[in-house]
Image (cartoon, coloured by chain):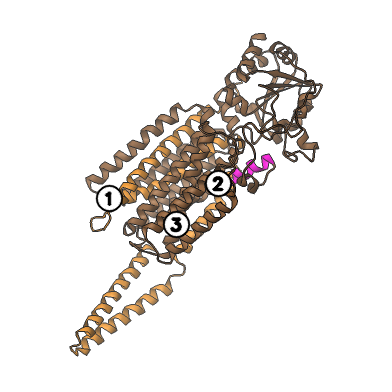
Chain colours: A orange, B brown
Amino acid sequence: MQDKKEQVEEAAKAAEEAAKAAEAAAANATGNADAAQAAADQARDIADQLAIIAASSPISDFVFLATIFILAIFVGYYVVWSVTPALHTPLMSVTNAISSVVIVGALIALGADLSDSVMSFWPKFFGFVAVALASVNIFGGFLVTQRMLAMYKKKER
Amino acid sequence: MADNLPAILYVAAGILFILALRGLSNPETARQGNRFGMIGMAIAVVTTLFVLEDKGIGTWFFVLVAIAAGAAPGAYIARKIPMTAMPQLVAAFHSLVGLAAVLIAWAAFLAPVAFNIGEPGHIHAGSALEMSLGVAIGAITFSGSIIAFAKLNGNMSGKPIMLPMRHPINLGLGLLILLFIGMLMTGEQSATTFFLLTLAAFVLGFLLIIPIGGADMPVVVSMLNSYSGWAAAGIGFTLENMALIITGALVGSSGAILSYIMCKGMNRSFVSVILGGFGGDDAAAAIGGEDDRPVKQGSADDAAFVMKNANKVIIVPGYGMAVAQAQHALREMADLLKSEGVEVKYAIHPVAGRMPGHMNVLLAEAQVPYDEVFELEDINSEFRTADVAFVIGANDVTNPSAKTDKTSPIYGMPVLNVEDAGTVLFVKRSMASGYAGVQNELFFRDNTMMLFGDAKKMCEDIVKAF
């Protein structure tokens, strides 16, 4: 799916360039009709190609992700109902720890290549702070859950 | 292939998180489940590190510093926190997830190219919606959890704070948030709009939680748990990351189910809890007014005598036990009873304490075996065969008027049938009513003996009296 998206993006870029070239040719108004015609043809070809790629893609990324999301909600529903009430506090602390997987987003921000971006300090700074906050939660959440679970003992017989 | 491997690893992390929750169906498998969770997290983090754009030495340095800066206090707190403080700890952790989600959404807003969601000022409408939802829910989670933390930790009164016009204000803020999201989607993507959206959500989170009383905190903490999950899912959609989406869905539904269980345990609708105004720590005068009927009062010696001669004692702990840190003294008392040949069981009401499962953790901490601890529906019929019900720090959850008195505010709430036991021993500091502000009919029954005093001290005195 990623490949297809890249293809689409590449094609879109190429189409844009072709259109620009056509525009430039027209603007030059040197009467170089051939060049303009060639550029326009190229643009049309690319547009056709785009249409084919789009048509062959049965579902959009969003629908795909939303499907996963909804299925995961159902999985969560059944899994959580099977959790014994005695372990509801560890359930909360462990869900807390795993929701810190947002650290993935924070790492992407911190490790982004922003050398040719207008804004390079703040996104990285926000990413840095978010990595630290999520780390508190990851370590704190898993360890406190472990500590609690170690306390649950069966009767010694 | 280069793109597929990380995607598969993220799904693997998501599956390990599912297994982490699955393990919690039983204390034996729970420890293994927690390890699965840790492995899943490690996979997600390492995978991300391998796909970073900028793998320069500077990035590694900052990543390590940030993780170390978070890991040290996190591990320290996890080791030192007393079990009675778990509710506020969980609230504090929720606020961190919320704030992290806000910061990530901001980073994505300012550097959309790095997140593959468009150009600055021209973020795709879908991504703008996802990140707006992420930032809004994250901000509500953050400020709401701060208030919940302050109330649970005693930095703030547990009493509901009722602002005038709060419903119209909240509704207005909600509409404002929707308006900003709409603006961001239709291309009005200035930093000001995004900032105003964040601000409105912060304020809304704050206002949503302040009217809710201390005793309704189990619902609030579960609800914020759920929100932190939805915020993660919002970020996950922005990043098109499977691990985040699966986790967000799991955590979101987990919190929602816990909220539902807590509401059912109080026989209150979710809406009425959220609208607030009920359940201060020390609610005003009892609905029935002052009551000067006589109660039977006993000493630690009397209690020790009654329990020693019993065959079966059921202990009913409540929030008061947590406040007095009485769980260890209680277990000591129970051990002595057991050595006298008395059968001892514990009965836990779903909303006892300040978070779901709070009492179970405290008893586990005091080394009470978990197979002596029973949930309401499993033990309620056993009170009939018990000689003594020992109620320590609980009140409303034992009030029989919830079953009989249709005018009572707690009518319909499931309660423990302690009045069926031969003798009811009530450890309480005073005659004050519980958080619902309802007089407990049980105090005036013939088979009830009130033991006035601090829960911990009372248990120690009973131990001495044996």
Q: Are marks 2 and 3 in contact (CB under 8 Å)?
A: no
Residue A14 image point, x, y percent:
28, 74
- Give the residue at x 40% y 37%: A136
Earlier residue among tags 2 and 3: 3
- Give the residue at x 50% y 38%: B91
Given this view, does label 1 or label 2 mark the residue nearer the observer? 2
- Does residue A153 appear in the picture of this structure? no
- Subunit ID for the residue under disc 1: A
Residue B282 image point, x, y percent:
64, 31
* Residue A111 sits above or below residue B123 on the image: above
Q: Look at mark 1 in the image and give the residue it sits on.
A: A121
| Other residues around mark 1 within 10 Å, as few (<14) / some (14–19) / many (≥20) | some
Instruction: Give the quarter of the image for residue B423.
Output: top right
- Helix or strand or loop: what does disc 1 sit on? helix
Alpha-carbon distance for marks 3 and 1?
A: 22 Å
Q: Look at mark 2 in the image and give the residue it sits on.
A: B208
Q: Is A107 or B41 nearer to us in this picture?
A: A107
- Helix or strand or loop: what does disc 3 sit on? helix
Residue A56 image point, x, y percent:
42, 73
- The amino acid at mark 2 is Leu
- Subunit ID for the residue under disc 3: B
**Taken as a whole, is the magenta stretch helix, strand or loop?**
helix
* Residue A30 sits above or below residue B215 on the image: below
| Other residues around mark 2 within 10 Å, as few (<14) / some (14–19) / many (≥20) | many
Highlighted range, magenta: B254-266
Quarter of the picture holding the N terminus of chain B = bottom left
Picture disc at residue B132: 3
- Does residue B159 appear in the picture of this structure? yes
- The amino acid at mark 1 is Phe
Q: Are marks 1 and 2 in contact (CB under 8 Å)?
A: no
Residue placed farthest to the top in the image? B465
